[in-house]
Image: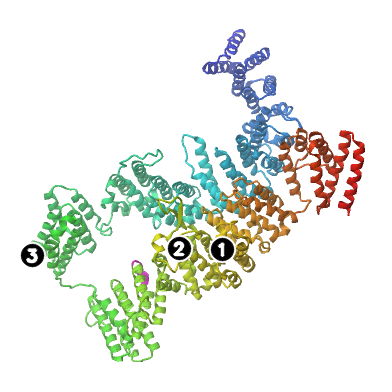
Amino acid sequence: FSESGLKKVTLALLDAANDRDPVVQEQVRKSILTLGNQQPDKVLSMCQDYLLKHPKLVVGHRVVILQTIELVVKSRIDDISYPKIKSVIQLASDEMTKSKEVVPEWQQAASNILVAVGNKYINDIMEEILGKFRPGVLPHFFVVQTLANLSDSNVYGMVPFLNAIMGTMLPMLGMTKQDNMKWVFSSALCHFSESILEYLANLDKAPDPTVRKDTFSSEIYSAYDILFNSWIQSRESKLRLTVAEALGSMSHLMAHDKLEEQLPKLLPTVLGLYKKNSEHYIISKSLSQILEASVNMGSRVLETQIDGLLVALHQQICSPMDFSNPPTVKNHNEVLRCFTILANTFPDRLMVFVLQRLENSNERNRMGSLAVLRHLINSSTSIMETKRLLILVSIRQPLADHSNKVKKRVVQVISAMAHHGYLELEGGDLLVRFIIQHCALPDTYHRPPDPEEVTNEALRSMCDNTLHLFTTTVGRLTDVLWPMLLCYLTPNQYANATTPLCKSLILLANKKQTAQEPNFIIDFNAQGSFLYRCIGVILQQCYNKELVRKQLQEILIGTRHNDAIERTGVAMGIGLCASSHLDGTLEKLEEFGKSDAFRKASGIFGLLKDKNDVDVEKMKSTLILCYGYVALHAPEDKLLTRIDSDILHNISKNFNTKVKQSVTFHNLGALVGRLAPRCTDPNPEVRRAAIDCVYRLMYIQLRYEGFSLDYKDDSVEGLLDVREKLSNPDNTVLYKTCSELTKIISKRLPQQQLSTLLFMLYDGLVDSQSNCSRASSVILNTLLKNRGAGLQDLVPEMLEVLHNRLQVIGEEQVKVAIGQSILILATQHLQTVVNTLVAYPLPYDSWSCEMWIALGADSTLALQIMEMIIEKLNVMVPYVDKKESMLRPGLTKVATSQPLAMTCALREMMLNGQSADAVAYLFPKLFSALLVRLGSSVGVQLPKDLNNICVSLCCVLRVAVEALRILLGRAQLDAVMKPLDQEGSLELSCCFLSHCGKIKCDHFEEAILSNRAMAKHAGPRLPSIVESLCPSLCNIYECQRITVTAFFSELLNHHVVTELMILDMLMNNMMERITDTCGTVRMLAVRGLGNIAVGSPEKVNKYAKELLAAMSSGMEENDDPGKLITLEAMSGMSKILIYLDQKNVHLLVACKYAMRICAPVIGSEQISAMFQNHLLEEKGLHHGEFINDLTKYLIQDFPGMLNFYHITVIQFFKSNWAEIRASAAMFIGKKIYIYSIVFKKKKETFFLVLMYFSYCYFVVVL
């Protein structure tokens, strides 16, 4: 274009920019940009001139032109002349601030030009902007917005200016009244903070690498003070969120001591915003930043807030996530980030919290916990390393969940676990099985109405994909899946999973074959003759009977009958085949039994194979096994007619075997079990005969094992020495000799005979001869010590037999020995023993109780068991809500069996005096667990199956009461026991904990005796008890939170908490509880805070600000039907004020704040303005002038109220504080003086002054 042509085209385009069609506007911008790229200075000049010549352009027209200028500047900033840049800056600045009213579209377009120019010419931009950002004058909205955006777009250029900018801005914050200006200041502070953090994180690129965080800390804290203490309480949701966002960014720049001081207030306030706002993403983002800042500085206070944080975050993670609504997805991710931050600092408490909620009855709670678990496994690998076994155990609970939504989350967790090595650990096979089970899910026949529901098809597809991913992307799983997956091909319940299984097996096989890995070739003998089972499954589905017969023939002839594993595999395969082809299978087996294979080999086959008698016996064994599996799998309707004639008949024909190889003397255990106890018979001849029999039996067994007739075994020969010792009738010698005898038997007895021997010895425990019954117990315990480790599968059965024997044994020494047996088994199989005994029917009978008491005899073992029970009690569901009757409304709390049983178990174990060391060591944890259990038992009924039979339990509460009483006695806390022994005192305590404020005062005194006694007499243990109880403060069960809060509240009534330095911890916990969802908990928390004035009055001034805020909050409580919280807050306030220093700065600040807040309600614009301008927290106050102005405005605006004010203020003449008396005198004096001037009543005033000073003299002075 020529210059004139360029001008015409540009002007035409600028005229066209007024078109209302957005498409036309966009094309105009693009066209002018094209021209501007060629001649930027000229095009910019024409745009400027156009705007200047047409000052009344409509806003839309001006906006398009300004947007076009921004595009040209962004595109050709380096080619635009400096004078033109200066003029563009001036134009944009004028356009942005021309209207004092906020016109967002117009002013934002102008602001964007300044930001674009500021990317290169930051000093010129700041010179212009700061001219409109003068101290003491509120700036234009978009001046602040531009500064905020500049700090984003040009971090390195803006940060050097920020200290000065914030210094100018801080006084403006106190002047700001309009919400939109508060919003823009908050937004700017957020942007400034983020820019500073980015600058500090990249100091190597920064123009000034000496900049430090503390350069900004003072200004940031001053701004924080206003935002947190005033603006965040705004009714405007948008403002609250922006303030919260700013606080999150600012927290990183606050001085460590300031942030630590603010955390107990800041965190609950931010958490409280969740309830006030429907949009949660910004809150979660702010929270994650605050947590990160706290963790980075090593905060100690954060630990006191952890419980409330976990509850709030868990509620957020359980909220449904809508992928069509991005903020909900962002919120979900920010909440997970919070969990990650906490996991790095509090891994134990976080894991207990999350895993506990896997058992929650609410589906969304379980889903939320699984989401957190998956995230932690993926994001906190090093932290989770030590938790892998705990996670593997805990994930078993959701594996059994019935909800497909939950199962979907479980699959996601398993996928994460697979990538981090969990599936290679013990128990990982269960997770693989879960995936395969759900690859075999049937179709959903009835489509669920819930659109969020996960269908069987969707879950199955997900599991198919997960199995494929395991095979292709998780290399470490190759050796786990190969050959495990093969084992799932044959069982019928996995039939629908055949396709994904085979696909994965092909991929695994190809991978191993290509890598030439040695374990590619599978020894199927070691795998339990897997192939034979596969053939059996295939034959099940085959309809060609002739083919089935032919395959059965080949299997039976080709089997290596000498191989026991292969024989079993063949029998299982043939049994599977019989489920579909019973007649054909039985015919083929009978035919095989009559074949030449069962005769001595001859002819050419004799040359190839030596078919001796042993081979024939093994073939018979195969045949018998086959008949057994045929009977197992055959259709029931056909089996009955064939069982005698075909199956049992053929088995009996093959049972007459000749044994000529190493086998076990199958009666050995039974015979030795009968004879060994007789070795201590009162009759010496019987003793000698018994030992001789045992001697002969041992040699018979040796013959069975293949030893020659003349072989002499040293250990068996030792029985001859034992026989000589048995001639001594002394019982001590006999039992010692009996122990030697058992060691020899233990050495020579085959493992498969051990169980028979043990159960024979159990019979011997009730022998009519006491010597023999004692000998049985000695032999039994010696055997268990030496060989019991391999008997895990028999432990439940052995315990049941011991339980039965206890019921008929009268010999005390044998009963003690049975206790030893239980201890030995527990030492070797602790988890199995505990699980078995816990599962015994409630109420425990006296013999079950004796078994638990026996476990308390070994202090080390008792310690382990008690720790296990405590851990379980802390995470198990204490009761469930059930509908008592269809006719009656409401739910009834019904105790769950396991926690009830475990409480009974603890009670019995602690009755054993030898458990004292374990109890002493675990006392804080035991006391905490039982106190919480006690609170969980109030108003809880027994399960229906126990109501009619339960006499000894009386009620769920009684069990916890007795256990706690025994614990205190065992811990030698006699002083605590005395008040508890009063009739009904502990029950009343429970009632109090559950229904605080609803019982009479005299009962209350009894009710708190236990807590008071603990405070006085359990001092050294209290810090550990408090620490153990803290996690229960965020429990989902109100009764548990009530219990712990009541206990803490009473502790604060005693000075011991200060002496033990746990006051801070208790104080912070109480502050957190004042926002609890349960009104009783809030009331108790307020009570506890008020109790600080009684227990630790010297600390009142230290916590004045927090205590006053808590009491004020309590008095304004809305959700308080009986006004119990309000009354408690008033009571607490009266206690606190007695000890509060009248010069306490927090009291001063609180009064100023209260007066500013109340000012608008007074109804006087003059007073309201005065309060807002003069009662600033950081500023001093000339009290005389303030009182003078206040009285003047009161007289002018409320002349009818003067008498009321006069009477009210005179009451303060009797205050204990001289400053208050003086202030009251000044107020009345000023009022009288100004009254005389305003109403010109000098005579009346003279008499008033005389009366006033006379009154002051007598009341104030005297």
- Between tags 1 and 3, which lies in front? 1
Which quadrant of the view contains residue 1136? Answer: bottom right
> Which element carries disc 2, helix, strand or loop?
helix
Please report whichever mark, 3 or 2, sits nearer to the chain's N-terminal start.
3
The kind of secondary structure element at disc 3 is loop
Residue wearing tag 3: 602
Q: Nearer the viewer, mark 2 or mark 1?
A: 1
The region drawn magenta spans: 788-793
The amino acid at mark 3 is: Ser
Q: Which residue is mark 2?
A: 900
* Residue 792 covered by magenta stretch: yes
Residue 756 to residue 1163: above or below? below
- Residue toward you, 946 or 652: 946
**Residue toward you, 989 or 777:** 989
User: Which residue position is annotated with label 1?
Assistant: 988
At label 2, which amino acid type do we have? Leu
- Name the dominant secondary structure of the magenta segment: helix
Q: Quick check: 1143 above or below 26?
A: below
**Tally of numbered tags:** 3
Residue 797 located left or right of residue 1233 = left
